[in-house]
Amino acid sequence: MIPTETIGPYPLSTLLNSSLILRENIAEDKTGVPLQVKLKLVNVNNSCTPVPAYVYIWHCDKDGNYSGYNGEAGKTYCRGVQYTDTNGVAHFTTIYPGWYAGRITHIHFQIFLTAYGSNAQSSAISQMAFPADITTAVYNSTLYSAKGQNTSVKTFSADNVFSDGVEYQMTSVTGNVTDGYIAELQVGIKV
């Protein structure tokens, strides 16, 4: 089972009432190291068979800003909803997230089994974690160097969300800074 985590910060759930948020490419005009996100939903009650569902993800841009908040009102970058394919995978095209004070690098996600919307009942809310060596390489790149490495939270144990462990939330990441990365995570839910 994927651990339940806080929906905050910055969920901007009202966006879920718009069909425009149903999209694979969520980077919009934001620059950064390209990132493909693949979340594979599996039913832990049925031999890990694929789960058909809507997946909403959101994360900060390379500078630690979230669309819709703190001077970014009306913007929707780094947010989107996808319906899983026949293998239970939701695909997103985005950029590698930056960081902000108090948190280590992460992506939020929420799963809806029947319909998505601000009033829809979700079956899981959690967050994706990223390997430290990949994050260090990204933040050392010229696209991220202005902000540099995270000095407020340097380890998962010091992060207020991941301090209890990241065993089921750690993404498998392949690729490189030049060509971009693919981050994959199997998400176990009960259906």
Image (cartoon, grey):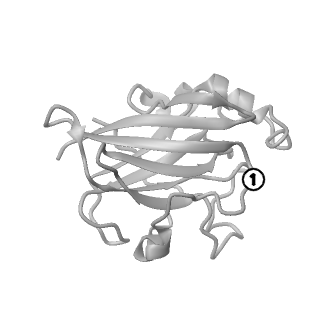
Locate residue 94, reporting x and y percent.
Answer: 60, 51
| Relative to 50, residue 140 above or below | above
Using residue 71 as the reference point, say whether residue 10 is left or right of it. Answer: left
Up the image or down, 163 lies above or below 128; here it is above
Residue that badge 1 annotates: 31
Query: Is residue 56 visible in the rendered structure shown here?
Result: yes
Residue 10 visible to the viewer:
no
Q: Position of residue 154 (x, y in %)?
A: 66, 28
- Label 1 secondary element: loop
Q: Position of residue 147 (x, y in %)?
A: 81, 43
Q: Nearer the viewer, residue 67 or 138?
A: 138
Residue drawn at x 29%, y 48% as measured from the top left: 86
Q: In the image, 173: left or right of 82? A: right
Q: Quadrant of residue 28?
A: bottom right
Residue drawn at 49 percent across, 69 percent down: 21
**Is residue 100 shown left or right of residue 165?**
right
Q: Identify residue type, mark 1.
A: Thr
Nearer to me, 180 or 189: 180
Question: What crowding class fits label 1: few (fewer than 14 Cα within 10 Å), some (14-19), or many (20 or more)?
Answer: some
Seen from the viewer's position, the closer of residues 16 and 147 is 16
Establish if 142 lies above or below 90.
Answer: above
